[in-house]
Image (cartoon, rainbow, N blue to C red):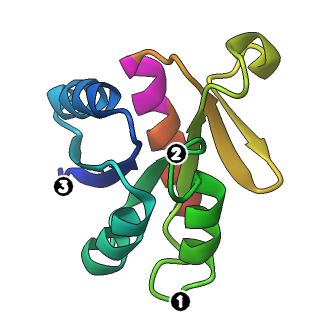
């Protein structure tokens, strides 16, 4: 089985480290992390990951701006994006780990590794 290539764009280095380690430990994913939105856009264009995990609240360039650029670029417009955010609580999300709002996928932080892996796989299945 081919590992799914995930690009994580989040300004919290510790969060990136743990998400990368936990997802790669499943054996299903290869994760690249970057802590700045602009560099994340460049990397997405170059690497064409299977899915992008994107923080909303970042300095310099917020996640919604990063997503807009990626979605308006023909080279990256088909790459699914899951927004990771602390702006929405687990309580507000209800029983689901991932929620689709306005054709965008949202996951509330904190999230377990299992919930995140399941959510990524669900979004990737919808894409195929």
Image coordinates of residue 52 in percent, x first then y, are: 44, 55
The crowding category of the residue bearing disc 3, from other C-alpha atoms within 10 Å (few below 14, some 14 to 19, many at least 20), is few
Cβ atoms at labels 1 and 3 below 8 Å apart: no
Q: Which residue is mark 3?
A: 2
In terms of image quadrants, where is residue 78? bottom right
Image coordinates of residue 64 in percent, x first then y, are: 65, 57
Q: Which residue is mark 2?
A: 58
Q: Secondary structure at mark 1?
A: loop
Label 1 or label 2, whichever comes before in sequence order: 2
Residue at point 76% right, 56% down?
103
Most extreme residue toward the bottom is: 74
Label 1 or label 3, whichever comes before in sequence order: 3
Which label was assigned to residue 74?
1
Badge nearest the viewer, 3 or 2: 2
Label 3 or label 2, whichever comes before in sequence order: 3
Image coordinates of residue 86 in percent, x first then y, are: 62, 25
Disc 3 to disc 2, C-alpha distance: 31 Å
Residue at point 45% right, 28% down?
116
Disc 1 to disc 2, C-alpha distance: 24 Å
- Taking the image as shown, residue 38 lies to the left or right of residue 102, namely left
Residue at point 78% right, 15% down?
94
Q: Secondary structure at mark 3?
A: loop
Above or below, 104 against 10 in this view is: below
Front residue of 43 and 27: 43
Disc 1 to disc 3, C-alpha distance: 25 Å
Which label was assigned to residue 38?
none
Q: Main secondary structure of the magenta part?
A: helix
Residue at point 34% right, 75% down?
42
Which residues lie in the magenta part?
Answer: 113-118
Queried whether the magenta region covers residue 117, the answer comes back as yes
Image coordinates of residue 102 in percent, x first then y, are: 83, 54
């Amino acid at each position: 089985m081919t590992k799914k290539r995930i690009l994580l764009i989040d300004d919290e280095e510790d969060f990136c480290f743990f998400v990368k380690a936990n997802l790669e430990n499943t054996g299903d994913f290869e994760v690249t992390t970057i802590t700045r939105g602009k560099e994340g856009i460049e990397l997405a264009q170059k690497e064409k990951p299977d899915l992008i995990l994107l923080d909303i609240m970042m300095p310099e360039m917020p996640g919604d701006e990063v997503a807009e650029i990626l979605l308006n670029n023909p080279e990256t417009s088909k790459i699914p994006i899951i927004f990771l955010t602390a702006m929405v609580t687990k309580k507000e999300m209800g029983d689901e780990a991932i929620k689709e709002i306005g054709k965008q996928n949202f996951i509330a932080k904190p999230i377990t590794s299992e919930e995140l892996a399941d959510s990524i796989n669900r979004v990737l299945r919808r894409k195929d």
